Amino acid sequence: METLAVGGMNRRCALPLVPGATPEEGDPMNRVSDAGRPSSPEEIRNVVMVGASGAGKTALFEALTAARVPGRRSREGAPPPTVVLAAAALPTGAVTVNLVDTPGQPDFVGDVRAGLRAADAALFVVSAADGVDERTRLLWRECDAVGMPRAVAVTHLEQARADFEATVTACQRAFGDAEPLALPLVVDGAVVGLLNLLRRSVTDHREGDGAADREATPDEAELIDAQRGDLIESVIEESEDESLLERYLGGEEVDTDTVSEDLRTAIATARFFPILPTHAPSGVGVEALLELCEHGFPSPASAAIPTVYTPAGAGFGPVTCDPDGPLVAEVVRTTTDPFVGRLSLVRVFSGTLRPDEPVHVSGHLQHFASHLVEEHADHDSDDERVGPLAVPVGDDTRPTTAAIAGDIVLVSKLSAAETSDTLSHKDRPALVEPWALPNPLLPVAVHAKSKGDEDKLAHALQRLVAEDVTMRLEHNAETHQLVLWAMGPAHVDQLIEALSSRYHVAVEVEPVRTSLRETFVRPTKVQGRLVKQSGGHGQYAVCHLEIEPLNRGAGVEFVDKVVGGAVPRQFIPSVEKGVRTQLEKGVLAGYPVVDVRVTLVDGKAHSVDSSDMAFQTAAGIALREAANDATVAMLEPVDSVRIEVPDEAVGSVLADLRGRRGQVHGTEPAEVPGRTVIQAEVPAHELSRYPVELRSVSHGTGTFSRSFVRYDYMPPALARELAAGPA
Ligand SMILES: Nc1nc2c(ncn2[C@@H]2O[C@H](COP(=O)(O)OP(=O)(O)O)[C@@H](O)[C@H]2O)c(=O)[nH]1
Ligand SMILES: [Mg+2]
């Protein structure tokens, strides 16, 4: 049995999707039971868990899974940090809750985006000990912009510095209309139950005994009633029923069913956000959360569907969440298992996915991207066949025979399908507009530790790139480096670890070299002489060159001003070729020379010993002779940079930019309130670790983009350092 998981992190798979175990072989009914699987989109809830790293998402994910999948126990001890999406289909009441756990570290925001695409509602996990952090706030705003229904699970309640009330206030300040549905019952530093505000009841959790509901004691009832009013008022305010609010404020008791119904509407329309106290280790809040998913969150039938085109870019026509509609599905995550092959986590938007059916696979990232994604070249394939389907259950999978519109499923053997690709019917090919892909901006140069592994490395990187749309590869022809662009240092570590554990390639990391340019800074006259006439066939060529600097961006010019045939006609192109070749190779430090005019003014030839080669060589000699520290300067690439940070970080970001030789062109308010956009020009050399450094001066929420604008003079001391450096 081999490892197999959406995460690809050495997890065991109980029901392997290996050849020979496909549902089609033998009697499918013996192998695949679809009992309990959703038969209509109304029976599905897709929920993504997001929040700060360490807030307790994975612990909660595992507790929720353990509560619904028999035989699964919560993990002992601390879960390892999540670096990829994990999913679990949890039968809950009349529905299946497809739960998606995401990583909290900023480096893996790509997976958070993918999770948000897969889901129709988001569960924000907030630690009562740490409160709401800036990145969580930002993510909330993103969900707000698309009207995604949200709820908040509060964790770490038994910690000494935890304060549920303060956390509720912090949520209200950061998120808006949020109220708790229950209060935590904390006794002697342990979370032992919930006070349910709507039902006015208490749920006790006893270790080993599970949960039991009982009536509230008078003290508990007092606590409940002190909070219940706020909840009911909030909910009724969001209801369309004006007279209800009037009656309620007038002192009339409103029945719980009416409030429950209004609550459902308010959550589903993303106008009200319920807060639930939870404690994963003891299971407190787990049932309440699942109940909230079932009754509060909307089904995919009422969720927005992303824009769908044909692969040619035309309109596809209306797409609804209909199992009988045309197939439109999207790969939200890809893993390559060395034994099982490619495994794709797929969200079905329309139609029904069935094993063994041919599909069209379409990916046009380059078309939609604002930046170059050359390794994700646009591709369309009609040669794909859906392999066995399986339902993800955390680390495990369960085979299934169909995934209807609205569902999330694992598909094996889609060899051409990359993350964010669209699956559709061959006769009705579709292309879903990809979600907003983050641009990886941290470069590291890598090479295989052992020379013989270069091919293996290239192959493994190709695989990783297909899985991970947040990494890029660059083969830099100038510096001869293989550069891996990643989201941050943790992402780099993850990629290097994947190369070694999954593909058995050990790599070494080296500093990224900046491609510089050389240029002449003062007019220079020079002679190049190649005179070799001792014995045998000699070589003879002399050329006099005048070198003049040109404006930035002017390029290289060659001018012939020879008079009287001092250099014979047939050798003029030889001189030009020699000049251009030498300029490309560099004249001082090995970088291409730009923005220069070279004029051939005079020369000498020999009737026997002169040749094309001799004149090419002489031209090169002349240029090298002309080059020294006084005549040649180094140019470095300068990028135009757009930085977005929280207002309060602007001061430190500007100070930091000055330290990077940056020129600030201006600041303006960002689209998102409370944030500022800074426009600047910064030498590329100073940006090589910027994703890391920006994070530290911007509470982790700074983002930036960069694009090359021009070459500019580099301080000579730095140029000497780079030229001499080991890199
Ligand atoms: N005391 C306490 N620890 C928790 C709670 N929830 C999670 N943890 C622990 O907090 C750490 C981080 O949790 P994890 O689920 O990995 O956080 P994630 O990064 O949000 O996925 C782990 O050691 C968990 O066992 C909680 O409610 N109380
Ligand atoms: Mg986690």
Image (spheres, rainbow, N blue to C red):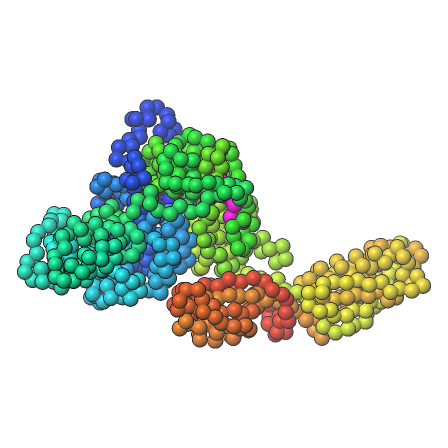
Q: Indicate the position of residue 168 as horizontal and vertical percent values.
A: 23, 63
Q: Indicate the position of residue 408 as horizontal and vertical percent values.
A: 35, 41
- Residue nearest the viewer, comparing 380 with 719: 380
Q: Is residue 581 left or right of residue 242?
A: right
- Residue nearest the viewer, comparing 44 with 315: 315
**Picture residue at 82% right of the left edge, 59% below the top:** 575
**Picture residue at 58% right of the left edge, 53% below the top:** 475
Q: Quadrant of the N terminus?
A: top left
From this view, report whether residue 617 is shown above or below residue 96: below
Q: Is residue 273 left or right of residue 474?
A: left
Magenta range is: 360-366
From this view, report whether residue 60 is shown above or below residue 28: below
Report which quarter residue 514 is drawn in. Answer: bottom right
Q: Is residue 354 magenta?
A: no
**Picture residue at 7% right of the left edge, 62% below the top:** 219
**Picture residue at 15% right of the left edge, 52% below the top:** 256
- Which residue extends farthest left? 218
- Which residue extends farthest top? 26
Q: Indicate the position of residue 134 as horizontal and vertical percent values.
A: 35, 65
Q: Is residue 365 magenta?
A: yes
